[in-house]
Image (cartoon, coloured by chain):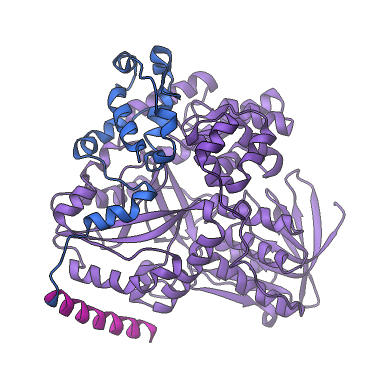
Amino acid sequence: MARTDSLAKLALAYGVHLARRRLRRPRSQLSDLLDTYASDGIRELEPSERERHPRLVTCINCGLCALAAGRVGKARLPDLASSYMRLYARLGDASSDVAGDTPDLVAASAVCPVGLPLDEVAAVVRRLAIR
Amino acid sequence: MAASGSYDVVVIGGGVTGAGVARDLSLRGLSVLLLEKGDWGAGTTGASSWMIHGGPRYLEFDWDTTRLSTQDAGYIVTIARNLVYRVVFLIPVLPHDKNNIERMETAMEVYDRFQPLKKAHPHRRLTSEEALRAEPGLTPDLIGAVTMEEWGVDPHRLVFANVEDAVAHGARALNHTRVTELIRDAGKVIGVRYRGADGALAEARARVVVNATGPWSPEVAAMGGARVELRPAKGIHIVYPHRISNFAISAESVDGRDLLMVAHAGFTLLGTTDDDFYGDLDSVDVVEDEVDYLIQAFERVFPTIRQYRPVRTTTGVRPTLFKWRRYEDELSRRYEVIDHTREGADGFISIAGGKLSMYRLMAEETSDAVCKKLGHQAPCTTATQPLPGNESDPEPPAVLASRCGIPALAAIKLQSRHGTNSEKVLDEGGTPRILCRCEPVTEAELVYAARHEQVRTLADAFRRVGVAAGPCAGAACILRAAEVVGTELGWSASQRFEAAREFVRGAWLGRAPVLGHAGWAQEELAQGSMRGLMRVDGTH
């Protein structure tokens, strides 16, 4: 009975929805969506970042880059790749960690056993850390 | 045998429901003993999708379940603010999907009526171009998308927060303690015998015994000569140690089921399967076919999924109420409070079925049944009484970080577990040093967990504070974690080493089914460091 009742109500809602779609001109809801969730850290990656993303999250936290180049701001380099990059929805509250000096990231990437492009990682993290 | 204890209620089962019952009854002024054979939330609760959701799919079967579920989700979101975060789904519609975009939007319009109950926003509808802007990883083949908001939660912390609050209100709670027997006398269950973490046998007398053991409830009911009938269903998830997408994404499986890729704070869960389960509940394996089934579905909507390296799998068994003939996905997630008096087991109550999102309501109704039996009149307060750490608003993480000398990101994570108790946790441990850098977790938090949160193994530490949950899966931190926990618990050097080996071996078992898919090079490196340090070869 509950199932029949549920399906009947859904069918009615479907009819109302179709009628409403015919009567109203649709408008874009993308900016509403992004505005609604900006404070929750849900922000779009740029298409180029999206394309490179699988490469940007391959850190295994071996620590070799820290030996080569130290820190970005207050964040140790392996942490930037292993922790900051994966928690990017929360970076808005952690911008103070990555503000400041940038070491030689190309040198750091050169010693990375999985070939992580640390300069790209740092750029993404810093962009997302700015609210 | 150890000396007997006497309680108003013994609750068996330390998943979210059992912990919720213990909290509820303690808040009502009853004396409670809570027993868990493993660790808090280590069974079905921990293997969930980590979501407090309203259940839009129940709209097809029973709107009342959706209403109850969203309403209770709203209560949980209020009492556990530090543990929850918004998870926004993008539901892409592809050509030949079983539901076209108008049907999907209709379902979301109906769901929007319930969303205010759980403090969530209404849906949005996107064209294919807009959906690709919001989530560039989606397939360009999509026709459009609708969004839907749910809440994410750390189920391990949610369970422990309930345990902690129960203890704060007088309950006794023991993990790694297995009930071996129900004590019966003249048609009544009057207590339990149990084996503690130290191996010693003990017994506890109680006026009521509650069976809240999820899929194990038929087994525990049988100890009391009673019957609980379930149709257990196995579900697996693939865990990626990164946030792969901005939005959570849904996909249709090859057999038309709805699957989810859930973007949590720092990781992604991809699941879940739903298959009748007849095996050993204490040894549920993941097979590669299940992994392939999930990845196949998501490759269709998120083509780069195979380029990501999963870090492990999780598996659990749902305690679904028994129903003959129904397809697994169509089984109700309703629950039932069963008084076993008619079966000759007076004083024995089981709570069966249900789901994480309704745990508080399940606990309330079970506690009502217990109170009725005891003639105890006290109202339930769990819908409004905040869980520990949620009594007031936390300070900004950057302020906590600066005062305590930890990175702001570590402060964010700490607050997500401990809320306003974060500074107390750091003070207790005495050191701001970061132990697990992937998460990140401070050494102080682990010290606190060993002293005050019943951490007895490194797997307990993983559940309590997330140590070794990141991409390195413990390669960089597990030995140090063993040192810290071992120092607190008085482990010898060989016990510390063995604890670390045991953790790595367990982690390997969860990782093996996903290794065929991506990142062999990274896995080899991570495992290589383990082998070198600990002689773990993954063959055990």
Asked if residue B110 is positioned above or below residue B154 in the image, the reply reads below
> On the rendered structure, is B85 left or right of B479?
left
Looking at the image, the residue that sits furthest to the right is: B3
Residue B29 colored magenta? no
Asked if residue A76 is positioned above or below residue B390 in the image, the reply reads above
Asked whether the viewer can see residue B5, the reply is yes
Residue B329, x across and y down, in percent: 37, 67
Q: Which chain is blue?
A: A
Residue A9 colored magenta? yes
The residue drawn where x is 44% and y is 75% is: B67
B142 or B343, which is in the foreground? B142
Q: Colour of chain B?
A: purple
Principal SS element in the magenta part?
helix
B188 or B88, which is in the foreground? B88
Residue B378, x across and y down, in percent: 72, 75
Q: What span is in magenta?
A: A1-22
B188 or B262, which is in the foreground? B262
The residue drawn where x is 38% and y is 49% is: A39
Residue A27, x across and y down, in percent: 16, 64
